[in-house]
Amino acid sequence: MSKIFSISKPLDMHLHLRDNDMLNLVGPLTSNTFCGAIIMPNLVPPVTTKEAVVAYKNRIKQACGNDTFEPYMTLFFQNYSREFLEDVKDEITAIKLYPAGITTNSETGVSSMDIETLRPTLQAMSDLGIILCIHGETNGFVMDREAEFMPIYESIASNFPNLKIIMEHITTKSAVEMLDKYPNLYATITLHHLLITLDDVVGGMLKPHLFCKPIAKRYEDRAALLNVALGANPKVCFGSDSAPHPKNKKESCGCAAGVFTAPIALQVLTELFEKHNCLDNLQKFVSDNAINIYGINPPSKTITLEKADFKVPSSYKNDTETVVPMYANEVIKWSLVN
Ligand code: DOR
Ligand code: ZN
């Protein structure tokens, strides 16, 4: 008998589902294992109105068919009025702030992180209990971008002590250290940043499917991330940042940033936590911590995995889209039990 492991209400607190044919292809690859996910708003154009949030949520539900799956919606950060936020509040879980131009489809993001410019919107969010998710990178040297952003996290966290702030997809020891400094700072951690360093991306043959933003960092950074994830530190939770791009946009001169992990995320997390003798903590990292941090009540769903080899497909495709998953053509050690 192979080893069996079950997870209740798995949640992915940072997910890109895109739209149209890509959404129809990748949506079910998350909704068949996760019971809910925070949906990123960096569509073209970005999600900035109540109508766009509601319509996008409906398209996601349509794409995910009969799966038990709750899309937790976000707006793309702009300077929004208090009246607008009061009106949209019940349709969203968070607002995602991107510095302008920092990553895919973020051109209309925030051009100045000056706290006084952001204050009216952040104060209204704080008063209304809307969570702020941040892509925390400057446009400095690529390996230093996240560390250089730390003073901005500090400034927002101290100016708005009642605002819950999520440092998205943290990749550095400096971000991990920040968690202990401010009670209102939390973080999501991806699967790929727990697994790889910059060496895996560019240290041998260039691996476009591992290229993402923030870029994977040093060994000591990965060790710091593993420490809080495997230990299920209550201030961190899983957010895959699974970010599908068409195969030809990844395997191209000018590779798009993003690692597509949705179809293998839960299985490989299980493998990783088992390898480190921390399987008992996976439930917290992939569900309980998120429920506490975001104050959500996700639908019931239990996913059972067995320790059995699974060969990851070379790609996932429909009539118009092809996307390559992390570990394409490789064998992973855990499989989903249907
Ligand atoms: O690698 C990334 N891909 N990082 C991001 O911040 C955005 C994402 C995307 O949307 O493709
Ligand atoms: Zn993202």
Image (cartoon, rainbow, N blue to C red):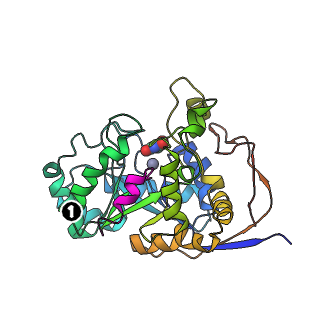
Give how far across and how far down residue 324 sits, in percent.
65, 40
Name the quarter where the N terminus is drawn. bottom right
The residue under the point 40% across, 50% down is: 41
Q: Looking at this rendering, what residue extends furthest in the right direction? A: 1
Give how far across and how far down residue 28 sits, in percent.
62, 56
- Label 1 sits on a secondary structure element that is helix
**Most foreground residue, 142 or 112:** 142
Judged left or right of residue 256, residue 48 is left
Q: Which residue is mark 1?
A: 158
Name the quarter where the C terminus is drawn. bottom right
Which amino acid type corresponds to the residue marked 1 in the rendered image? Ser
Give how far across and how far down residue 287 sits, in percent.
53, 70
The residue under the point 74% across, 60% down is: 334
Mark 1 Cα-neighbour bin, 10 Å: few <14, some 14–19, many ≥20: some
The residue under the point 80% across, 61% down is: 308
Task: State which region is magenta.
Answer: 169-183
In the image, residue 67 lies in the stretch drawn in magenta:
no
Give how far across and how far down residue 313 sits, in percent.
74, 45
